[in-house]
Amino acid sequence: MTESTFEHICTILKEQDGVTEELTPETVLSEVGLDSLAVVEAVMACEADFDIEIDTEANPQTIGEFVELVDGLLEEKQA
Amino acid sequence: MIHTPICDMLGIEKPVLQGGMAWIADASLASAVSNAGGLGIISAMNADAAWLRNQIRSCRELTDRPFGVNIMLQSPFAPEVADLVIEERVPVVVTGAGNPATYMRGWVSAGIKVIPVVASVGLARLMRRAGATAVIAEGGESGGHVGDLTTMTLVPQVVDAVDLPVIAAGGIADGRGVAASLMLGALGVQVGTRFLVADECTVSEEYKERILKANDIATIVTGRSSGHAVRCLKTPFSTTFARLEAAGASADELAALGAGSLRKAAVEGDYEEGSFMSGQIAGMVRERQSAAAIVDDLVDGAERVLSEAMRWVR
């Protein structure tokens, strides 16, 4: 997990959804007020920012899972 | 006559879909709307596959026209119901209450036309990529589970964001609403509340009377605090729910209070304890009619409005 992806996702969640809680990789998205629509919006924002395409079936539950998802795609892209 | 690409896509005559209202939209109502030239939709609600199979089969006995099934993704039976619609070759699946991506591949490869209800642009984009045939952009004016955006703001933004046919829903109950939806870029409408009082709708008499008596400010949204916002008529149940919610009741307490309340309204007509889900447009629903008369009035009304639309253009 790279720090930059984690930070970027935290920024998206703070700016787009007004999340004020301290975020860690273990943070459960639904526990900081992010419903499925908010997660979809965050996924779409990541796609645009990182120029990747996330699987439509992806359903990350924690910030850590979200970061792994994005990092996995970034690695694929570079390979 | 109003004919849009949605009609050809779904094999229907008129671009009117009937909302898949849980405990309300059964084979009786769905077949009547399909026979009227629209698309009737059976709600799979929280029922199991055996119940839904019966409904699908009785719908087929009542109509030979296309119909759909609305799958509520939060239902504990969603996985088995998702398989059943493939097995039964249901022509159209509408999804509500969440992200249906997990099931999309199976449905699309079975040739089912999938039309997810979306409450945001992001979900509409995701559904387009997952293989949706069209999307229903449903504003928070609607009854039942609601999102934050209104139909007026959501529909044009979804139309701009995805190159899919968009069906407008939420706050539509007459020809003016249909015409306005087409002007916002939608190619069809989904209507729920007005069909509640259709002759073929098997919902309780109490429910129908409450809709007919409702005025413009008769509804309330509860459950926002737990992320399950629901619009229903102001009744003893919903006002109690709202009061407890405001007083900080836990999500579990609220869920326990809400359990079974829609069934109490729809089946038992229990005014005290029932949850009478309804759209804001209930105030305009004044008359019991056949489903066919409702479909005709929506489409003919839209035609009248649209034919006069050039009046202000100089």
Image (cartoon, coloured by chain):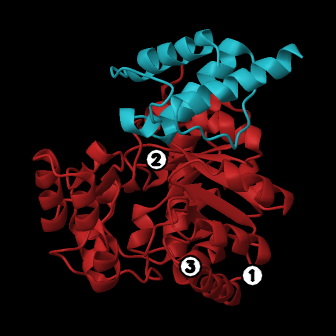
Chain colours: A cyan, B red
Dot 2 corresponds to which residue?
A: B177
At 60% across and 70% down in the image, what residue appears?
A: B40
SS at badge 2:
helix
Work out whether disc 3 and disc 2 sit on a shared chain.
yes
* Quadrant into which the N terminus of chain B falls: bottom right
* Quadrant into which the C terminus of chain B falls: top right
SS at badge 1:
loop
Chain of the residue displaying label 3: B
Dot 3 corresponds to which residue?
A: B48
B190 vs B260, nearest the viewer: B260
Dot 1 corresponds to which residue?
A: B64
Q: Between disc 2 and disc 1, whose residue precedes? A: 1
Residue B43 image point, x, y percent = 53, 71
**A48 left or right, relative to B206:** right
- Bin the neighbour count of mark 1 within 10 Å (Cα to Cα): few under 14, some 14-19, many 20 and up: few
Dividing the picture into quadrants, the one containing residue B36 is bottom right
